[in-house]
Amino acid sequence: MDPIPRQIASITRPVDSLMTYYVLKAIGTTIAFPVMIVLLYFRYHTMRYVFGEEGIRMSWGILFRHEILLNYARIQDIHLRSNAIERALGLARIEIQTASGGSSEMTLEGLTDPEAMRDFLYSRMRGASHTTPASTESAKLAAVLDEIAVELRAMRVAMEGRKDG
Amino acid sequence: MVDEWVARILRVPPEPDAPDGSPGSVQVFRAGKNYYRWRILMWALQHLMLLLLGVALILGFFNFVTRRVLGPMQDLSIMIEVVALALVLAGMPFTYYLQRLDYRFRWYMVTDRSLRIRNGIWSVEELTMTFANIQDIAVTAGPLQGFLGLADIEVRSAGGGTPGPDGTTSGKHSARFEGVDNAEALRDLIQDRLRHYRDAGLGDGDHHAPVAQEPAESAQRVLAEARALRAALG
C-alpha cells in the first residue's frame, strides 16, 4: 500500500473558516445562540484529526469527550456535502459510512481540500483498486489448466494428421 | 445562461470528476427528459395541497379544532396563516425554477469499480460507493413515473435503515439514480459489475476480488479435450 500523502498526513486541525461557519450556524439557531456558540466554540477548538496508515482517528470535546476510530478498509460510502454558505467559505463536509448503523459514523469538517480528501479515502476503500486476476491462486490454476487443454488439442491434431497421412 | 449565472452565485461546483476506474469504463448517465416534467408535476401537486390547506385554514374550516388549542389567540392565528400563505405564493417562482436547476445539475456516474452520484443546488451532495460494498439493487416506479417512462434505481450497501413499504430506504447507505429513463439497461450494467465480486461485501480484504477466470471452467475444457483425444485414438 502506498504511504499516506504528505498533505493528508499533515492534517491535524480544521481550518479557521470552520469557526466562521460555526458562528453563522449558531446565529441561524436564533434563540439557542448562546448555547450553540459555546458548544461549537469548544467543538472547533478541541477537534483533532489523525490520518494514519490503517485509518482515521477523530476526537473532540472537553466535558463530553468523543473519539472515533475508523478503518479505511471498512468505509462503505463517502458523502461530500456542502450548503451554499459553506461553499462561500470554501468548506465542505465529508460524511463517512461504515456498515454499522443508520447515521454517518464520522463527519470530517473544516478540510482545506475536501475533494483531495475524498479521492484519498476512495483510493483506500475496498474495491477501489483492482488486484490483478493473475495474482490470485485460482486464476493461476485456471491458466495452467488452459495450457494443458491447448497441449491436448495439439496432441490430437498431430495424431489426426499422422492418421490421415 | 441564467442557470450558469445562478450556479456561479451559489457556487455550485461543476460536473464532478468520475471516480478512478479502468480507463474507458466511465459511463455518465443523466436523469431522463421526462424527469423534469415529473418534478414540475410533483411541485404543482405539492403547491395545490398547500394552497388548499392554507385557504381552508383561513376560511376557518378547522376552527372547531384550533379554538380549543389556541383559545383567545384564534384571531392572531388567521394573520399568521395569511402571511404564511403569502410567503408560499411569493416563493413559487423560485421553487419552480429550482426544479429545472435540480434536473440540470444531476449526474450519475458508473465505472467498472464504483459509482458516483451528484445532486442538489443549495445543498450539494455527492456520493461515492464501490461495487465491492453493494448489497442489493431496488428498482421502483410509481404510476406517474411509469407513465412517463421513468424509474428510480436504488443501490444499497450494508447497514442501512429498514426499507419502507415501497422498498426504498432513502437512508445514508443507499445511492439513488432518480428518474432515469433507461432503468433496465442501467440495472443490468450494475448487476454485471456486481457479478465480479463473490464475497460478502462486508469489509473483507481485497485479496480475492475480482476473479476473472474460473478453474472449474478451465478443467472442463481440459476434460473435453481429453475426451476428444481418446475419440481420435479409437
Image: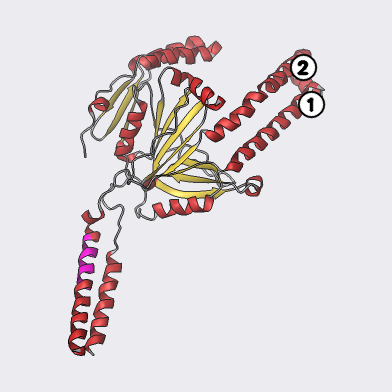
Quadrant, the N terminus of chain B:
top right
Q: Which mark is residue B56?
A: 1
Q: Specify the subunit that label 2 lies on.
A: B
Q: Could you tell me the amino acid type at mark 1?
A: Ala
In percent of the image, x 47 and y 45: which residue is there?
Answer: B155
Q: Specify the subunit that label 1 lies on.
A: B
Q: Calculate the distance from the C-alpha at mark 1 to the C-alpha at mark 2.
A: 11 Å
In percent of the image, x 59 and y 47: which residue is there?
Answer: B150
Question: How many numbered tags mark residues here?
Answer: 2
- Is A158 left, or right, of A32 in this rendering? left
Q: Which residues are magenta?
A: A140-149
Magenta highlight on residue B170: no
Task: Pick the residue in front: A102 or A120.
Answer: A120
SS class of the residue under badge 1?
helix
Q: Position of residue B24 (x, y in %)?
A: 36, 47
State whether residue A39 appears in this view.
no
Q: Could you tell me the amino acid type at mark 2?
A: Ile
How many neighbours does mark 1 have within 10 angstroms: few (below 14), some (14-19), or many (20 or more)? few
Q: Position of residue B39 (x, y in %)?
A: 62, 36
Quarter holding residue A159? bottom left
- Which residue bears the numbered disc 2? B78
- Is B93 left, or right, of A47 in this rendering? right
- Is B212 left, or right, of B89 in this rendering? left
Q: Earlier in the sequence, mark 1 or mark 2?
A: 1
Q: Looking at the image, is B38 positioned above or below residue A135? A: above
How many neighbours does mark 2 have within 10 angstroms: few (below 14), some (14-19), or many (20 or more)? some
Q: Looking at the image, is B162 positioned above or below residue B93? A: below
Q: Main secondary structure of the magenta part?
A: helix
